[in-house]
Image (tube, grey):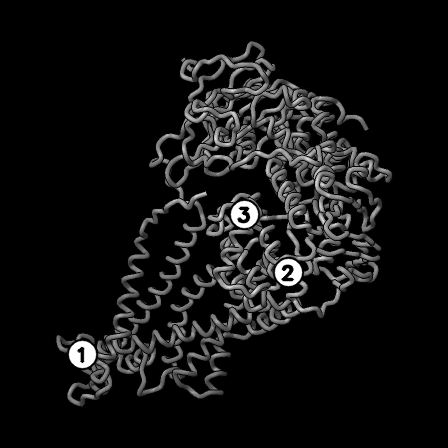
Amino acid sequence: MAELIIDDLTVTFGHGAKAFNAVDGVSLTVPSGTIVGLVGESGSGKSTVARTVAGLQKASSGRITLDGEDLLDARAPRRERARNVQMIFQDPYSSLNPRMTVGETIEEALSIHSDRTTAERKASVRELLELVRLKASAAEQYPAQMSGGMRQRVAIARCLAVRPRLIVADEITSALDASVQGAVLNLIRDLQRELGLSMLFITHNLAAIRYIADTTAVMRSGRIVEVAGAEEIVAAPTHPYTRDLVAAIPRIEHAGTDHLLTP
Amino acid sequence: MTRRRRRLPVQPMAVITAIMLAVLVFFAIFAPLWWGEQAVEANPDAIALPPSAEHVLGTDNLGRDILIRTLVATRLSLVMALAATALGATAGLIIGALPAVLGPRAQRAFSNVIATWLAFPVLLVAMLTVILLGPGSVTAVLALALTMTPSFARLAQTLSARVAGSEYLAAARMLGVSRGRQFTRYILPNIAEPVVVNVTTSIGGGLLALSSLSFLGIGVQPPEFDWGRMLSEGFAQVYVSPVAAIGPGVAVVFAGLAFSMLGESLAGHLRRRTGRTVRPHRRLGAAPRTLVPAEPAASAPPLLDVQGLCISFPGEDGWIRTVQDVSFRVARGELVGVVGESGSGKTVTMMSIAQLPPAGAVVTAERLTFDGDEFAGLEPGRAGRILGTRIGVVFQDSLTALNPALRVGGQLAEVPRVHGGASRAQAHAAAVEALQRVDIPDAERRAGQFPHEFSGGMRQRTLIAMSQIGSPALIIADEPTTALDVTVQRRVLQLLRRQCEDNGSAALVVSHDIAVLGELCRRILVMYAGRIVEDVDATLLASPERLAHPYTRALAASLPDLDTDRSQPLATIPGEPPDLSVTQLGCGFAARCAFATDRCRTEAPALRAHAHGGRVACWHPQDGVPVPLTTRAEAVS
C-alpha cells in the first residue's frame, strides 16, 4: 500500500465563458495504510476528485502522485495503472457485467494481473469470496440473482483481486438499504485492518465516514473547507459549513421530538 | 436465491417455423445430391410441357423438370441469402459496436460514416456494385451485404452506446481488460439479443432481395440458377405454361416466411425469458385474502382505517403475497412513518391506499375507509375519481414525477383546473402561491421554468407544493428525501412537517431510514416481508431497549450514528429477507432472529396491542414485557 498525494488539483468543465472549476485547487494526502474520507454534497466536486484519481477523468492542472509516481501520466501501461488504483462504484446494480457470473468476473481481474494456472485462479476466487464473506457457491451466480449488498461485496472482491496500491470507494453504501450499509462498512473496516489498505472513501454520510475513516476532508464548491480527524470533525467542527452538515444529520435520539423544527 | 425451473409453453408458431426450416435444410442438402444432374440436363423431347403426372410443374424451355429445378435451387438461394446476411451483420457489428471500446472520438467518426452510408439508396448501391464487379452470384451477395451493413451498424451502435456508458465497462477499463476482450465479453453479449432477432428476420428480406436481383438479370448468371433466375425464366413462358413461374415463386415466399417467423419466434422467446412469466388470474384462483379478522370500527372514526389489506401479484407458480394482513389507522393530522427494507412492501401498500397500485397487483381489504368513504372492493379507477384530490402523493424521484416538457407552473395549475374547475388565471395564481408556500424564491419567474432548471431539492419541494394544492386531508410521501443531500433533506422534512401542521393534514411517509422518520413522525409502522411487525410511538426509538420487536431494534442499531463506538463492529442483521413467492409458515423474520424458537418457525404471530402503547407481532418481544401465550387460532376465534 502506498501514499497518495493530491497537489493543487483543478478540473475544469466546459469552455470559454461557460467554463467552471468542478475541482478548484484541491490538495489532500492519503497516508499509507489509512482511510481518508471525503465528504460533501452533490455538486461539491468530491466524485470528480475520485474519478480523476482513478484515471476516469482528465485533470486540468495539478499533480497526483502515488509514492512519488505520477498518476496523471497517460503513457503508463494499462496493467500498471490498474495495479496502482482501483475504484469501487456507487451502484452495485450497474457496476457488474450482467452477462458474466461472479466467478468469471473475479477470475478475469485475476487473469489480467497474474499468470497463475486455472486451478490456482479458482482457488483465489474462493479465497476472495471468503474474504468478502460470501459463500464459494456464489461464484456460479449471475449478478441478477443477488441482492444489492451481495453485489457490492462482489465488486469489492473484484477490486481486491488486482491487489491495488490504492482503492477509491465512491459512495459505495448509498445505493444500499440501511440495514445492509452497516455490513458493508464493517467489511471495509475489517479488510482495511487485515490488508493495510490505503483508501479514499467518498460519501455524503458523515456518520459513516466518522465510523470508518482516520481523517476526514469536507468539500464544498470544488474546494476543501476543513480537514481533521474523523472523530474530531463531527465532535467539534470549526468551519460553519461543516457545522451545518453535522447539524442536518437526522439522529435517532431526536426521535419523536420537535428538534426538526429548530432552525 | 435459486433459479426456479421454467416451464416454457411450446408456441405453435415456433413448431411451424421449425418444420418449415427443417424442410428447407433437407432440400438444401439432399436435392442437389439426388437430382443435381437431372436439373441441368437438357431434354429436347420435353420442351415447355404443361403440368402432367410425370412433370408436376411442367418443364422449361430446355425440357428440364421445373419442380426438380426448384428443389435443387434451394441450396444456392439459401446459401446466398445466409452469406449476404452474415457478411452484412459482421460488418455492421464491427462498424457499429467496436467504436464503443475505442473511445468517444471513434464513436463520433463511425457514427458519421453510418449516417452517410444509410443515406445512399439501397438500389443504387446494389447497381453500382454490379456495374463495378460485373454480374454474378458473388457480386449479388456482396451488393446485398453492402446494403444491409449500415442498418445493422446503426442498431449495434445504438445498443452499444448504452453499454459504453455503463459502470461495468468503466470498471473493466480500470482493471486493464484489453479492448478485444471488452468487445467480446462486455459489448457483444449485452447487445446480442436484439441483434440476433433483427439479423434472423433480415434473412427473409435478403432472400427476397437476391431473388429480385436475379430476376432482373443482374444476379445469378446461367448455367447457375436460383429461385429468382427461375422466376425470370418462368416469366418468359408465362403465356404457354403459367405454372412455370409458380414453383420458384412459392419457394421464395415459403423461405422468406420461414425466416421472418424464426425471427418473431426468437423475439417472443426472449421477451418471455426476460419478462416474468405470469399465469393468468383464472388459473391461479382467487387472490389470497387476510386471515385476521378486522378490528371493530372505532367509535370516533379515524381519517384512514385500513383492515386486512393484502396485495398479491400473479407469479409463475401461484400468487406472490407481497403484502399480508396489514391493518392500521391514521388519525386526522397525524404524521405516521413507514419503515422497511426494499421489498418489504411499504411502497406498494402506500400506493395501493392512494389507489395507484402497480400493474398486475390484486388488492383486497376487509376495510379501507378514508374520510368516511369505503374503498375496499372498488375498482381503482372509480375509487380514484371519488378520492379526487383528497390524498396528495409525493413521489420519490422528483425528476420523473414531473413532466419534463411542461413548465412547472403549468403542472401545478393542472390540479385546480381539472379538479377545482378554476379559470386559467386563478389556477396560475394558485400555482404561484403554492410555490411561495414551499419557500421557492421568485416563485412567479420559477413557475415559468421547466423541471430541469430546478435543483433536486427545489423539485422535491415543488412536488410537496403540488401534493398540497387541493388541501388534501392525507399526504402520502414515498421516500421523499432519499436522493437529497442532508442539508436539503432537513429543509424538505421541515417543510413537510410545517405544511402538515399548518393545514391539519395527516401524512404517511415511507423511508428506509428510521432516523429520518423518527424526527419527522409521531408514530412508526415497521414493515418486514409484507407485514407490519411493530407499530410504535416515535419517542421510543430514542431508547431502543423499549422497542419490542427484534427487527425494529436491529434496524435502529444498524445505522452508524455520530456517537457509535468506533472500536466495535456495527450491528448488522444476518441473512436475507424471505422469498415471498413461497408461502410463509411462521414469522417472516424467524430465520434472521437470534431469539427465534420452534413456535416462531411454524406459527405466524399476529399484530396485537402491546404494553408499550403500540402493537407488535412477535412471540418473544424484547422489551421485557411478556405476551399472553395464546395461539393465533385462539386469537382468531
Q: Amino acid at mark 3?
A: Glu
Q: Looking at this view, is A48 or A18 the one in front?
A: A48
As drawn, B237 above or below B148: below
> Are the residues under badges 1 and 3 in a single subunit?
no
Q: Quadrant of residue B36?
A: bottom left
In the image, B131: left or right of B562? left
**CA distance separating discs 2 and 3:** 23 Å
> Are the residues under badges 2 and 3 in a single subunit?
no
Q: If you read the primary sequence from the N terminus, does the residue marked by circle 1 or circle 2 appear first?
A: 1
Q: Residue furthest left?
A: B53
Are the residues tagged 1 and 3 within 8 Å (C-beta)? no
Name the disc covering residue B50, or none.
Answer: 1
Q: Nearer the viewer, mark 1 or mark 2?
A: 2
Q: Amino acid at mark 2?
A: Met
**Where residue B318 sits in the image (x, y, percent)?**
38, 36
Q: Nearer the viewer, mark 2 or mark 3?
A: 3
Name the disc covering residue A130, or none.
Answer: 3
Q: Amino acid at mark 1?
A: Pro
**Where residue B169 sits in the image (x, y, percent)?**
59, 59
